[in-house]
């Protein structure tokens, strides 16, 4: 029960420091403080904390909300343009993959003509197409999606900026 009384007095001290207590509450508080060392100690600590905060100045630039709004708008536009470039990159990847598959299919269909022109066997032409066309094209298609990651890391790793 004594603890509840001290909690209510501490709350009353906080209200008095904010200037929000009635005359009767203030008189009751003064009376309690005369007999309670713990509550006096709480009042002294609260007064020191308030005095310490008095040395801080919290001045802000009146244009700060406009500056923050402009920065957020700019960042949103940057993110939107990056999203657009990711979409364009995805379409480029699909186009490269389709062209690789179409070119590989066309080259395989023409391997008899290549064999005749280069005086090679059917198997040699197919191995040549795989080594010189299909594998490099497939590697390029697989590496294409990593270009944005490499382009973001490279300037920072070398200490350069775009």
Image (tube, rainbow, N blue to C red):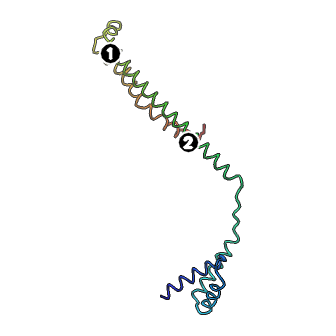
CA–CA distance in space, label 1 to label 2:
43 Å
Rendering coords of residue 9 (x, y %): 57, 84
Estimate how packed mark 2 is, as few (under 14), some (14 to 19) or many (20 or more) residues with alpha carbons within 10 Å: few
For residue 156, which numbered disc appears in the image? 2
Along the line of sight, which residue is nearer the eye, 130 or 62? 62
Secondary structure beneath dot 1 equals helix
Residue drawn at 67 percent across, 74 percent down: 52
For residue 87, which numbered disc appears in the image? none
Residue drawn at 60 percent across, 90 percent down: 32
How many numbered discs, if any?
A: 2
Residue drawn at 40 percent across, 25 percent down: 97
Name the side, left or right, on which 118 lies relative to 27. Answer: left
Name the side, left or right, on which 93 lies relative to 15. Answer: left
Rendering coords of residue 162 (x, y %): 60, 37
Rendering coords of residue 83 (x, y %): 51, 37
Secondary structure beneath dot 2 equals helix
Indicate the quadrant where residue 47 lies: bottom right
**Image vertical order of residue 112 relative to residue 131, above or below:** above
**Image vertical order of residue 108 relative to residue 1, above or below:** above
**Image vertical order of residue 136 relative to residue 27, above or below:** above
Please identify the residue farthest to the bottom as the structure is shown: 35
Q: Nearer the viewer, mark 1 or mark 2?
A: 1
Name the side, left or right, on which 100 lies relative to 51. Answer: left
The residue that label 1 is drawn on is: 108
Along the line of sight, which residue is nearer the eye, 7 or 105? 7
Rendering coords of residue 79 (x, y %): 55, 40
């Amino acid at each position: 029960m004594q603890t509840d009384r001290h909690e209510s007095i501490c709350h009353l001290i906080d209200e008095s420091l904010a200037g929000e207590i009635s005359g009767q509450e203030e008189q009751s508080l003064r009376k309690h403080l005369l007999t309670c060392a713990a509550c006096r100690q709480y009042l002294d600590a609260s007064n020191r904390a308030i005095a310490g905060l008095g040395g801080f100045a919290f001045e802000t630039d009146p244009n700060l909300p406009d500056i923050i709004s402009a920065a957020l708008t700019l960042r949103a536009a940057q993110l939107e343009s990056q999203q657009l470039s990711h979409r364009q990159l995805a379409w480029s990847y699909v186009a490269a993959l389709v062209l690789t598959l179409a070119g590989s299919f066309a080259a395989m269909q023409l391997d008899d003509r290549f064999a005749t022109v280069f005086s090679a066997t059917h198997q040699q032409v197919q191995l040549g197409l795989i080594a010189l066309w299909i594998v490099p094209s497939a590697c390029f298609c697989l590496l294409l999606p990593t270009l944005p990651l490499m382009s973001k890391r490279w300037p920072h790793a070398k200490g350069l900026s775009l």
